[in-house]
Amino acid sequence: MAQQDDSAARRDTLWNLNGLKILAYTVACYLIYIRLDEFAEWFAYQLLGFAADSHLGGAIAFFVADAPKVLILLVVITFIVGVGRTFLSPERIRAILSGRGELAGNVLAALVGIPTPFCSCSAIPLFLGFLQSGIPIGVAMAFLISCPVVNEVALALLFGLYGWKVAALYTGLGMAKAVIGGMVIARIRPERYLEPWVAELLAAGAGNNPGDGENELFRITWADRIFEGNKAVRDILAGVWHYLVGGIALGALIYGYMPVDFVSEYMGKEAWWNVPVAVVLGAPLYASAVGVIPIIQAFIIKGAALGTTLAFMMSVIGISIPELVMLRKVMKLPLIWIFVGIVALGCMVVGYVFNALI
């Protein structure tokens, strides 16, 4: 009994210390965040002595302001989501999606795609697990459409940089794209477009109980959850730091050197074809939201339409050659082209809606 009391006391002490550290870090991040623009201007124009209209000075000011700003947002939201993911195991996700009606299943799949810790490529093994658990292909495809595009990093950065209205509209449109896409795919008899080995896997796993994993989830202590939050931060920084630095550096060059008239003409809202061209240009590229958002921020500052730049971003992170290569191992080309078409059409709809409203 005494040993149990000592263990409980140690856990309480550890929790209190971690709580104080989190509070101190949050306050420090806030105080730094609100002063970044002022510090960047002082650094570029006073300390380094560049003129206010200098191209290089503008690029340096953009980089100095945005690098820590994006880093702070990334660390904070990744920690929160990392803690939240301890409540959501793959088994529990499959249990949530199993046995739902078509509309409810697709909506839940799109929602589950937001906090799920997978990019467009690594989501595919979980997609297969869904199918093997008896989840309809349309519902699984809704998850696959939602997962990379409507993700917590993109939403956090959009919220931090452009406010809750932009983030909320982006979320709603992205989820609608996933839900409608899943329902459309369900109506074309997608089973006939699966590779034979996948069909055999589904037949072998028919009737399997996906399990819920709830007992293990609720045995995790808060100290464990904080550890997982810290681990999520370390893991995502290790995986995306090069996208972060590269994206902000490219955004800084765009901000400093690209003429305003050029951006306004080719990425504005006046020409209807700007949105589809942005989607086509973004599709072959492969980058995370962390690397793309600083680039679209620079375009917007230079006069690009928000909808056009968001369509470009969604195309980059929602359609990628590595993802399509992995999908080809699972499904035949007709279903892949249908998937690409739905995602691309959804990107264009998002672009046009944002350009019309904002």
Image (cartoon, rainbow, N blue to C red):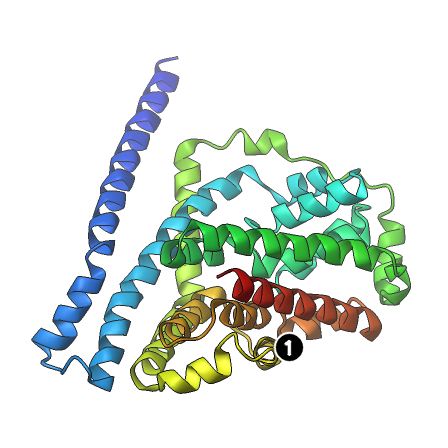
The residue at the point 27 percent across, 73 percent down is 62
- The image position of residue 151, as x and y in percent, is 53, 55
Q: Is residue 234 left or right of residue 51?
A: right
Q: Quadrant of residue 201?
A: bottom right
Observer-nearest of 84 and 27: 27
Q: Which residue is mark 1?
A: 321
The residue at the point 56 percent across, 56 percent down is 150
The answer, for residue 318, to whether it is visible in the render is no
The answer, for residue 49, to whether it is visible in the render is yes
Sort mark 1 into few (<14), some (14-19) or many (20+) by Cα contacts within 10 Å. some
The residue at the point 35 percent across, 86 percent down is 259
Q: Is residue 319 left or right of residue 1?
A: right
Residue placed furthest toward the top: 1
Q: Tag 1, which secondary structure?
A: helix
- Residue 248 vs 22, above or below: the answer is below
Q: What kind of residue is marked 1? A: Ile
Q: Quadrant of the N terminus?
A: top left
